[in-house]
Every structure is written in C-alpha cells, then in structure tokens.
Amino acid sequence: MTTSYTLQNNKITHMNDIKLMAERVNLYYGTFQALRNISLGIPERAITAVIGPSGCGKSSFLRLFNRMNELIPYARVEGRVEIGGVSIYEKSVNVVELRKRVGMVFQKPNPFPMSVFDNVAFGPRRHGVSSRSQLEDIVQRSLRQAALWDEVKDKLGQSGLALSGGQQQRLCIARVLAVEPEVILMDEPCSALDPIATLKIEELMRNLSEEYTIIIVTHNMQQAARVSDMSAFLMMDRDRAGILIEYAPTREVFSRPKDRRTEDYITGRFG
Amino acid sequence: MSNIAARQTSQRYAYGALIAATAIVVIPILCIIVYMIVSGAGAINWEFLTQPPSQAGKAGGILPAILGTFYLMLGTLIFALPIGVLAGIYLSEYAGDNWLTRLINLAIINLAGVPSIVFGLFGLGLFVLAFKFGMSLLAASLTLACQALAMIITTSREAILAVPGEYREGSLAIGVSKWQTIRYVVLPQAMPGIITGAILALSRAAGETAPILVVGAAFFLPRLPTSPFDQFMALPYHLYTVSAHVPGMPKVTIWGVALVLLCVVLSFNILATVIRLRSRQRGI
Amino acid sequence: MPRETFHKNLRELQDDVLIMGSMVEKALDRAMQALKQRDLELAKQVVTDDNNIDKKRFEIEEKAIQLMVCQAPMASDLRIIVATLSVITDLERIADHAAGNAKIAIMIGDEPPLKPLIDLPRMTEKAIDMLHRSLDAFINHDADAARKIVPEDDEIDNLYNQVFRELLVFMMEDPRTVTRATRLLWVAHNLERTGDRVTNICERVVFMVTGKMEEMGVSTY
C-alpha cells in the first residue's frame, strides 16, 4: 500500500491514495479556537491514528470529517475538508448522506435499547430497506464483519444492552458497517474496555482496514503503534488551540520522530 | 470515641424524625381512605353504578356522572396529548437555546400553577361564549385540556431530555436524520415518561371541579350525553352538589360518590406507577 | 517529571556499557603486555578475567530486556537499548580476541622471540584508543565523533598488512620459524578484527543518535 505523506510547507507532496483531506482547517467554538491551521491527507484503506495529550483537539479533528461538530452550538469551520476530492462543507452537501458514508464509533459503547438484530438493522431500515430477508442478510454480514456473529447468532433477539462491554462495542461497529460506509471514525473505541476486548477490536480494525478507511483517536500510544499505518501527533499551542506537530508513517513516528516535541511526548518526557 | 457515639446518636435521631414525618403524612391519608370505605361502601351496588339518578339525585345511580367523567377524560386526552407531546418534542429537540425558548419554557411551567378556576373562566369566555360551543362536553374537555397541556408539555419535555445523548449521537453518526432519530430512538425511550405524565395530568383533570362547574356540568341529567355539544354530569361536580346543595341526601350516598371518584383517580395513578415500574425493569 | 526512574535506569545501563568497555580495554592491554614481557601469570589472569566480562555482558543484556518489557520504550529510548545490545556483543567478541592473544602468549611460553614486538603493540594501542573514543561517543551520543573514528581502522589494517608481509618473509626464509610466526600472525589477525568490531560500535552509535543505519568503511578483509 502506498502511503501518502504530509503537507510540507503546506504543499502536498504525494497525492496518491488520499481519501480524506484537511487543508488549512481552523475550528472555532464561538470565540475559542480549537484547531489551528491543520493540513494533512489521510490515505484510503489504511488506519491513521491521531495521538496527543488530553484536550488538544483530537476528537474535534475527527468530527470534522462527519460534521458532528455542528451539534455543538457556535461551532465554525474555516478551510477546506474533502472526502474523495469533494469538499464536504458546502451548502449543497447533504449532511445525513455524508454521515452514512462516514460512520462513527464512540468511546463509550452506545447500543440502542433494542435487540441485537434491531440495533444492526436500524440504519438500513431508516434508509429504506424493509424486506425481512434483505435485513437478515445485512445483519448477518455486518455481524460477521465485526467478528461478533458467532457469539450472538443464537441471541439476535436479546437486548443489545445485555452484552459485555467488548461485545457492545463490536455491536456498535456492526451497526456502522450495516450502512456500508467508506470511512469509519473511531473516537477512543477501546478506552472503556478490558485488555482482551481491546486486542480483539484491534484485530478487527486491521481486518476492516483492508476495505475501509479508518481514523482512530487514541490516548494509548502502544495501541497507536500496534494498530496504525500513519500517525498524526497533535498538541496544544499556548492559547490552547490544537496544532499538528508531526504526521508520518507510524514506524517513523515511533522509532525516529522528527520533531523534538513528538519525541518528548512519545518517550513520556512530558505528559 | 465519643465522636462515634455522638454520630450514632444523631443518626438515630434523624432516622426517628424521618419515620415520624412519614407517619404524619401517611397515617391521616390511610384514615381518610378507611373512613371513606366504611362510610360509602354501603352505597356501592350494581344499581348505583349502572343506573341514572332519580328523585332529584336522592335515589337511583350515578351512571351519567361516571360516564360524563369518562367522556371528559377522553376529550381531554384527544385535545391535550398530541399537541402536548409535539410541543414537548419541539421545545426539547428543535428550539434553539435563546431568550424566546427560555421564556416559553418559563411560561409553561407557570401555567401549570394557575388556579383551575381561572382555567374555567378562560374556557367560559373562549369556548362557551366566543366559539359558541355552549355549555357542553366539548367546551369542558377543551378547558380541561388547556390545564392538562401545561403538565403534559413539561413532562414530555423532561422525558425526552432524559434520553441519553449517546443514543442520539449513535443514530446521527450512521446517517439517520434528526426526525428519524427522534421518532425511532428518542420517543420510544421517552414514551414511558410521556405516558406517565399524561396519565397523571388526566387523573388530575378527572378530579377537577372548578373548571367544569363554570363551563358545563349539570347536576341532574337523567339522560346520557349523546353528542359533544350536550351538557353532561361529572363525578367531582356531582359530589360537590350532593354534599352541599341537596337537603336530605343520605350520607352513605355522598360517601359512595366520593369513593367512586377516589377509585377512578386511584386507578389512573396505579396505572401510571405500573407503567413506570415496568419501564424501569426493561433495563433502560 | 514523568518516567524519571526509567530514564535513570537507562543512563545506568549506558554507564554499565562503559564499565564493560574499560574491562575490555584492560584485557587488550594486558594481553599485549603478557606477550611482550613473556608474563605467563598475567596471561593466565587475562584468560580468567574473560569470564567476568562474559558475566557482565549477560548482566547488561538482562537489564536491557527488563527495561524493554516493563517500560515499552519508544523512539530514541528504544534505539539506545537496541544499540546497547549490539555494542555489548561487539565488546564481548573483542574481549574474546584479547583472551585469544593471552592464550597465544601462554602457548609461546619462553620460546625465543622472532623479533622485538613493535607493530603488534602499536596495533593494540591504536585499537584501545579507538575503542575508548567510540565508547565516549556512545555515552555522549556524539555521532560526529563516532564517524571520525571509522576511517582510522585503515591504520590498523595497514599495520596488519605490514606484519603479514614481514612474517611471511620470516617463514619463507626459515621454515623452522613457521610455528612461532603463525602464532604471531594470529595475534595480528585478532587485533585487526578488533579494529573492525570498533567500527561496528561506531555505526551503532550513529544509528542510536540519528535513527539511520549508515554503512561506513568496509573492511578490506
């Protein structure tokens, strides 16, 4: 897989395989600037990790790509955000359609208070699929892709909330997969899970990345090192705006980071 | 060591005081209920519940009053519930956080505290006279609905706001529209709360005397109402009249009416409690 | 400061490498002394002390592995540990060369010398000096200093060539000297290999600092 590189001096050097792009993006919540001048290109069918200390804007950055920032009042985005070469912040863009293409998995698993089947079938049903047999196919396919089918195939009618934490998170992933997205955004998906569940989900991510483009925000550096192909390191500037310090293939970032600040963060010389 | 002993003593005092307070509230209520049952049970029989009154209400049954109360509840439900729930949805999901919304919310909360006789006069002026519905079931239902509306909007709003934001986020994040999210995720979750609120509002309306007094209740109507524009009898008004305005009314009959009214209101409340408990069991 | 214990342990690890290094320098020096002065006792001492050097090496290896397991080092910290593991291997091989020289001194015993030893001690001095400076570069994380040392291996190689030719001449002129000459040839070989090992150490120092493996100075042999 060819990797795409960062913007150097704000000029893109490799354009191959870039699925999502941010160009000189500034994000404001009211008068507070959450992100400053972020530019990078995210390769398709790979896992990109976003790391950095708490509060530096990682989640805000992630939500640029499915416009979930707009749920927060007074949120404002400047700059260009593209998916597949097309800007997503135009008035002509249907946000609901966008969020079908760009699905999201959250930190705390949030299955609906419905049966396992209904959870996974929820998206397709709302998008118009009503045939029972079609829904059954979709549910089975999605649960298989999420490595959950074997564990729940006899209990599809059971409430989603009755599953363990790790299973719930995989259910949420299946729910996203059921609407056939192109991109999956994951906001610290494993931080509420035990180590075994975490490893299962990491394995799942690797398998999924053959078909989907994945961006994962994580505060666990070992996880970023284990799981991702590219890593982006964000940090807070003096005025608490998030800035991009370094963006490179993961093995580079973790074995020979170019920026001193990246080195200090990764080796734990500052928290 | 004396610190521990002192704390234990103060614990016991607090416990004792709380038990006493509870007893002060519960015991009189139990006494009243027992007194009502003892005094009024004698009047309750099949004839009482299914026959219209005769002899100016001294004999016969109270069927029209029971039916009238029932029709009133139905009318209140039809007018207040849909509008109230939809308003609750709008105020919690769609209205922006600005001064106007806050003003509206404040107004609704205050509306719930307006004395019911004021609602009665309002209903008289608007429905009976201005809309020319006359003293009728329709006017009375609309009047009670106005009163119930405040409570239904508030409880709906609260039930909807109580639904965790994570469910909304999870739904929006897979490309489901806002209205679909509300309809298929938020509302079903909020439904127990909404229904409970509606039932409580209705049960309150069932017991209201002042508004219907002004707007349309009659004391003695041997025939049953056949259209919304008819006059009607109702239990609370009936109770008021037989206890205050009919000389020579057998006491047992008065208490019988009170007992029936109590049972109606109680059954509403029990229904609301059952729904609330069952929804909690479903693990939400 | 977070991870202060870890970074302290890391510095101690590097200090340990230096300790092992000075043990090795001493072994090289004493082995050559023993050879020059026919000091069999000293030679035996060198051979015995080689065990200590081996023990030290495993001790450092243990510590390094523990740091990796318990601390999940990243970036430059990881490179320090990886470089350490490589350097102590090279040091241990150098120590073996020194012990080899000492054993040869024992084998020679008090046979009459072929000629006064001049070039071999010079090779030893040069090797010890290069080793010492490479370990300085290691502890100071000085890639430039490490790079400068590498070409100096040519001096050792040239001296080796000289010794080789000289001994060859001896052997051709008088076949009875073959045994003694061969033994001395082996000493020279050990010292030449020592020089190569030191260049390995320098390459590792550069890697540790820059993160890149640079191939510097290919040995002629």
Image (spheres, coloured by chain):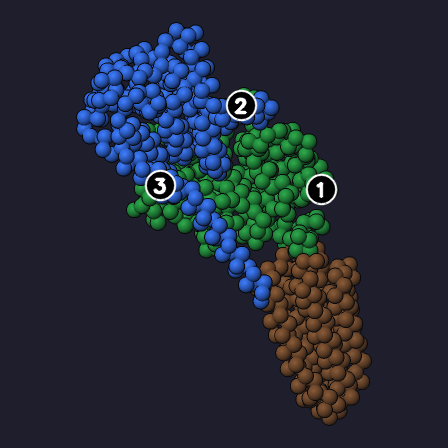
Chain colours: A green, B blue, C brown
**Numbered circle sitting on residue B79:** none
* Residue that mark 1 sits on: A237
Above or below A161: residue C198: below
User: What SS does tag 3 mark?
Assistant: helix
> Farthest residue in the front direction?
B248
Q: Residue at x 68, y 72 (%)?
A: C91
Please state, as top left, top right, bottom left or bottom right, where the C terminus of chain B lies in the image: top left
* Residue that mark 3 sits on: B30
Q: Nearer the viewer, residue B236 or A267?
A: B236
For the residues marked 1 and 2, what is the alpha-carbon distance in whole angstroms?
Answer: 45 Å
Q: Nearer the viewer, residue A94 or B1?
A: B1
Dot 1: chain letter: A
Give how far across and how far down residue B61 sits, in percent: 22, 23
Q: Are marks 2 and 3 in one subunit? A: yes
Is residue C188 visible to us here? no
Is residue B38 visible to us here? yes
Q: Nearer the viewer, residue B232 or C40?
A: B232
User: What SS does tag 1 mark?
Assistant: loop
Give how far across and how far down residue B163 sits, in percent: 46, 36
Give how far across and how far down residue B180 sits, in percent: 42, 27
Q: Quadrant of residue B266?
A: top left
Q: Residue at x 41, y 21 (%)?
A: B210
Is A161 left, or right, of C68 in this rendering? left
Dot 2: chain letter: B
Above or below C117: residue B274: above
Q: How many marks do you count on the picture? A: 3
* Residue that mark 2 sits on: B107
User: What SS does tag 2 mark?
Assistant: helix
Going by the numbered disc 2, the residue's amino acid type is: Ala
Label 2 or label 3, whichever comes before in sequence order: 3
Going by the numbered disc 1, the residue's amino acid type is: Asp
Q: Are marks 3 and 1 in one subunit? A: no
